[in-house]
Amino acid sequence: MKNRVIRGIPVSPSIAIGKVFLYSPKDITFKRIKKKGSVDEEICKFEKSRRKSLRQLRALKSELKKLPTKEPVRLIDIQILFLQDPLLLNSVEKRIRNNKEAAAEAILNLLESLKRDFQEIPDSYISERYLDVKDVGDRLLKNLGEDEIEMELKGHNNIVVAERLSPTETAQMSVDKVSGIVTERGGKTSHIAIIAEALNIPAVVGVNGLLNETESGDEIIVDGISGIVVVNPDENTKRTFEQKEKEAERIQKEFLKHKDLPATTIDGYSIDICANIELPMELGFIKKYGAKGVGLLRTEFLYLTSESIPDEDEQYRFYSEIARVCSPDYAIIRTLDLGGDKVFKTKTKEEANPFLGWRGIRFSISNNEIFRTQLRAILKASSKGNIRLLIPMVSQVEEMIEVRKIVKDIMKELKKEGHPFDENIEIGAMVEVPSVCLLADHFAKVVDFFSIGTNDLTQYTLAVDRGNKRVSGLYDHLDPSVLKLMRVTVEHAHHNNKWVGVCGGIAADIVAVPVLIGLEVDELSLPPSFIPQVKNVIRGLSLKEARELLTQAEKMRSATEVREFLKGELLKRFPSLKNILLEVEK
């Protein structure tokens, strides 16, 4: 079938046309364990594998240093540090000594334990971090079995198609042989996004049904701008996308030239444009793409990659580094958004629906010691820069009142202990649950700001699990009901002199920019590589016309209508975006 169009999530804004290379790595996690030796022999095997893995990663790092960007190198550094982490060494050795497990068995069981910690985490960003750990574990297992670790690519213009790719699989791709990447799994925040963008390889992830629709050798178009994949395009479609590729490259260069200009509309309305990040290695993207600080710093990875709950000093060092690099701009730190089973590393009764369960502030308030430790670390780090505090999964006003009581109490403790901190630190609430929108006038009296997380807000409003292939097509943050909830939130916040940010996927959706301006939000926080194009659109619109477009959009009956309407209006004002926003003729 010609022109088979599949949609996914764009993560590296460029375009490629090439031939499908179906990549399916050997599944070594269920390999039969070979004959087990003595305890000392198994520990020796593990150590030999660990040293070989370190040599491989250091060699890969040396090659990656030749690239003009440092991000892939930093990803490899994380894996090198993991292989040197005493917690990893002790965990494997303990399993070998105490449980009499073979080296491979000990690694497999450790991976399985960590996998349970990461599974069913509502935040896709965090769940994807398991790939870092599994990548290291797979390397250790392969080296125990003396297997080679490589992706055998022939020729040029290969479009790598896979269910998912690990960080090192992506990092060691040859840019001479790989023209594009498409995966069934992953999101805007996956490491594929970081590496592909750094290597300037077009990439689309989260493409449901991809493997059933492609075969090795198929011709394929990867549109990392619009998130479109076209399998077996006809000649007319290929010419169209070749033109789009040239135009997109020209426009992206123009966007980057003006990345440091403020995001101010024609009639003077300014919006702060910040970056969503989690790891210090991502801080380099802030200046690269013209972000004003960090609008969302996720902290869950600290808990998921440690055998025990991270202590105050460990968290303090991490938050202080973020504050230092961002200064004088601000960094908004979101407190822990995990369930108890992930924090305590224990088997607890599985929740039927973790999205509606014991997570975020519900968990934190129930576990005072863990919450206070994190708050103490954040407050102490606030002396190093402009830090703001953000509370996730809020649904009731009483939760924010309780948070303020706890923060006030901790401030008294820190004063007595002689620790400096920002006594006027701003405390905000995530807007992910419709109840917060509908009661925003009451919430505005107990918060300093709101941050709208449109990913969860859309799911909860439309009752759609975007990870469920059967209903994911119903998910769209431009649904009029979602826009109306956002408007209610902003109006009540501004009436009470509180500012509003947006940190969900809508902030990176170029088609949504007019309604975000019309809503009069004060800040947008998004994946760094999408910042220049969003800034450019903001500078080409007026607040007056954006308000009018929002009013019209809210009267429509579906997200499809809204999206088509806004796309048409954007093209009237930005003809140069024609190729960027084009659709495939089926």
Image: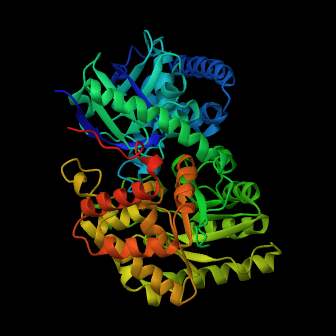
Residue sitting nearer the eye, 131 or 540: 540
Residue sitting nearer the eye, 92 or 373: 373
Residue sitting nearer the eye, 159 or 233: 233
* Residue 143 spot, x, y in % from top left: 50, 16
* Relative horizontal placement of residue 264, taking residue 210 as reference (left or right): right
The quadrant of the image that shows the N terminus is top left
* Quarter assignment of residue 21: top left
* Relative horizontal placement of residue 110, taking residue 475 as reference (left or right): right
| Location of residue 290 with respect to 25 vertically, above or below | below
* Residue 453 spot, x, y in % from top left: 44, 65
* Residue 52 spot, x, y in % from top left: 60, 17
* Residue 213 in view here: yes
Q: Residue at x 35, y 72 (%)?
A: 483
* Quarter assignment of residue 331: bottom right
Q: Residue at x 69, y 22 (%)?
A: 66
Q: Residue at x 27, y 75 (%)?
A: 555
Q: Residue at x 66, y 57 (%)?
A: 315
* Residue 433 in view here: no
Residue sitting nearer the eye, 539 or 513: 539
